[in-house]
Amino acid sequence: MKKDQKALLLEQLKKTPIVQIACEKLGISRMTYYRWRKSDTEFAKASDEALSEGSLLINDMAESQLISAIRDKNMTAVIYWLKNHHTTYTDRLEISGHLKHSSEKLTPEQEALIKQALRLVSSSPKNKHEKTIKKIS
């Protein structure tokens, strides 16, 4: 019986990749789901795959709705698509400034701070898409 429930839950997760909702549809508690994950590595792996497959399904559905909205001339949908699929319309980060050449070298601490700042800027959620960085000297 438990194996059947696990299989049914995995199939449900492929359709609805939200643990709470999938469990409710089958009358299984979330605690049971997480207990199964903890005690059964095969189930945990299959569960991860089912959730991933379900997410891909939802992504396809969402993209289909977005395309329908574009066909209906929904400007918000048009703008969203262009900003996320066309390099001309993506957000850009422009850095400008003037360089002064100095004989002074940066201290190791200053170099570390600059490297850390550049890493933070390049990994921020707003910069997840291709950015154009211009250096003006």
Image (cartoon, helix red, strand yellow):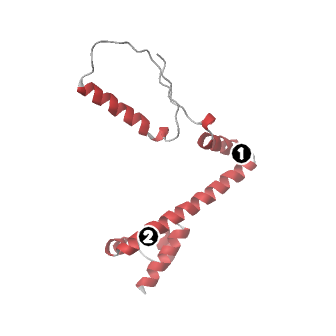
Expressed as whole percent of the image width and height from the top left, the position of residue 72 reads 75, 49
**Quadrant housing residue 6:** bottom left
- Circle 1 sits in a helix, a strand or a loop, which is it? loop
Q: Which residue occupies the foreground of this view, 134 or 37?
A: 134
Residue neighbourhood size for the residue with mark 1, other residues' Cα within 10 Å, grouped as few (<14), some (14–19), many (≥20): few
Real-space CA distance between mark 1 and mark 2, rounded to the nearest whole angstrom:
37 Å
Looking at this view, name the residue that lies furthest to the right. Answer: 72
**33 with respect to 52 (left or right):** left
**Quadrant housing residue 84:** top right
**104 with respect to 136 (left or right):** left
**Quadrant housing residue 87:** top right
- Circle 2 sits in a helix, a strand or a loop, which is it? helix
User: Tag 2: residue type?
Assistant: Ser
Residue for badge 2: 47
User: Tag 1: residue type?
Assistant: Asn
4 up-or-down from 11: above or below: below
Expressed as whole percent of the image width and height from the top left, the position of residue 80 reads 62, 43
Residue 89 - label: none
20 up-or-down from 93: above or below: below
Residue neighbourhood size for the residue with mark 2, other residues' Cα within 10 Å, grouped as few (<14), some (14–19), many (≥20): many
Expressed as whole percent of the image width and height from the top left, the position of residue 42 reads 38, 74
Residue for badge 1: 74
Would you say residue 32 is visible in this rendering? no
Q: How many marks?
A: 2
**Residue drawn at (46%, 84%), measured in percent from left and top?**
4
Contact between marks 1 and 2 (CB within 8 A): the answer is: no
**Residue drawn at (49%, 63%), measured in percent from left and top?**
52
Q: Which residue occupies the foreground of this view, 10 or 32?
A: 10
Of the two numbered discs 1 and 2 on the same chain, state the one appearing first in sequence.
2
**79 with respect to 44 (left or right):** right
Would you say residue 128 is visible in this rendering? yes
